[in-house]
Amino acid sequence: MAKIAPQRSFNDVLSVLGSQRFDVAPAHEGAKRTPNAFQVRKYGCAAEIAAAPDGSVQLLARPGWLLNGEISRLMDRGYQKFLKTSHLEIPATAERLRAIHEFTEELNNATGATSLYNQSLGTTSDVYEYDRVKGRE
């Protein structure tokens, strides 16, 4: 039988993240969308969180590798994964994928988010774009 973890408040999550050596700072980009947004960083990766209306944690920007201060999105093109920001796109290395996976798992544990089986096996992409099926109906 599955255990139901008690829901943590936003302030509790911030203290847990600080105790687990995450860098927690006010978000520059997220602050424009949501007041009191925070950017959480570790292992060269980052995500943006804010307090939800019910007092829990809301994920504003999914975890990704930091490229020039911007959180990248992970794209899967069938033959390789890429890290993409608004200005830059680079191939994802195994080291960076491991760091994103580790960061995501630790962030989910700290926030009390549900850990899904397919996500625990490895890094899941934000976008799947296969060139063989591009333009087809």
Image (cartoon, helix red, strand yellow):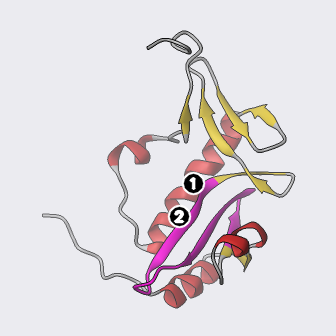
Per the picture, the main secondary structure of the magenta-coloured stretch is strand
Q: Amino acid at mark 2?
A: Glu
Q: Residue at x 61, y 56 (%)?
A: 63
Q: Is residue 120 left or right of residue 91?
A: left
Which residue reaches farthest right?
Answer: 68
User: Few, some or many C-alpha atoms within 10 Å of disc 2 (few <14, some 14-19, many ≥20)?
Assistant: some
Q: Quadrant of residue 56?
A: bottom left
Q: Quadrant of residue 37?
A: bottom right
Q: Residue at x 79, y 55 (%)?
A: 70
| Secondary-structure class at tag 1 | helix
Viewer-closest of 82 and 35: 35
Q: Is residue 56 magenta?
A: yes
Mark 2 — residue?
106
Q: Position of residue 66 (x, y in %)?
A: 77, 53
Residue 135 vs 105, above or below: the answer is above
Left or right of 85 in this view: 55: left
Q: Does the CB distance between marks 2 and 1 fall below 8 Å? A: yes
Name the quarter where the C terminus is drawn: top left
Residue at the spot x=65%, y=44% of the render? 73
